[in-house]
Amino acid sequence: MNDWLHYTACGLDNVWLANGFVIRETKYGTGVAVEDMDGLHSLLATSLVDKEGLLSGKEFRFLRVHLGLTQQGLGKLLGDVSENAVSLWERKDSVPAIYDHWLRMLVIAKLKGSTPVADAVQRIQTVERLIHQK
C-alpha cells in the first residue's frame, strides 16, 4: 500500500506528502487532515521562490494566495496591473518575467517578516475586504 498522499488542495499538481497528515473515515467518506497547513504552505512557498525558471500559472496563483491577495489586489501592488492580466497569466502560464520576480520578492519579504511589505499587503487586504462587504 502506498503511504503517500497526493495533496492537491493547494492548487498545485506535484505535491506529495509522506507524513504530516491523518486519514480518517467520517460519515461523509474518507477525510484528510494536514497537521501543519501553515508550515506546509510556507515550505511550498519557499520551494517555489527558490525554483529555477519562471513560475507556472498555478505556482504564481499559489504564491498570490499565500500572500492573501486577490488578483485585483496583487495587480494594484504590482503597479496598476489589471485583474484580467493577472487572471490570464495564471490560466495561460504566461507570467511575464518581471512580475514573476516581483511576486517572489514579495513572498520572500513576507516569509522573512518584513514589516513594510506586510503592512502594504495588509492595507490592500483591508481595502478589498471593505469594498466586497455587503
Image (cartoon, grey):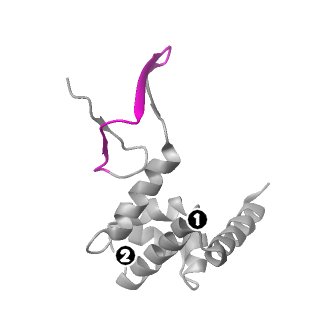
Q: Which residue in the structure is indicated by mark 1?
A: 69
Label 1 to label 2, Cα distance in Å?
17 Å
Q: Quick check: 48 left or right of 69?
A: left
Tell which circle, 1 or 2, labels the residue nearer the N-terminal end.
Answer: 1
Residue placed at 36% from the left, 64% from the top? 48
Q: Which quadrant of the figure contains the C terminus?
A: bottom right
Element type at mark 2: loop
Where is residue 12? Give x, y as percent. 35, 52
Q: Amino acid at mark 2?
A: Val
Q: Quick check: 108 left or right of 93?
A: right
Q: Furthest-front residue in view?
A: 112
**Mark 2 burial class by Cα count in 10 Å: few <14, some 14-19, many 20+:** many
Where is residue 14? Give x, y as percent. 28, 50
- Decide if residue 41 is in sight here: yes
Where is residue 110? Give x, y as percent. 55, 68
Residue placed at 41% from the left, 33% from the top? 21
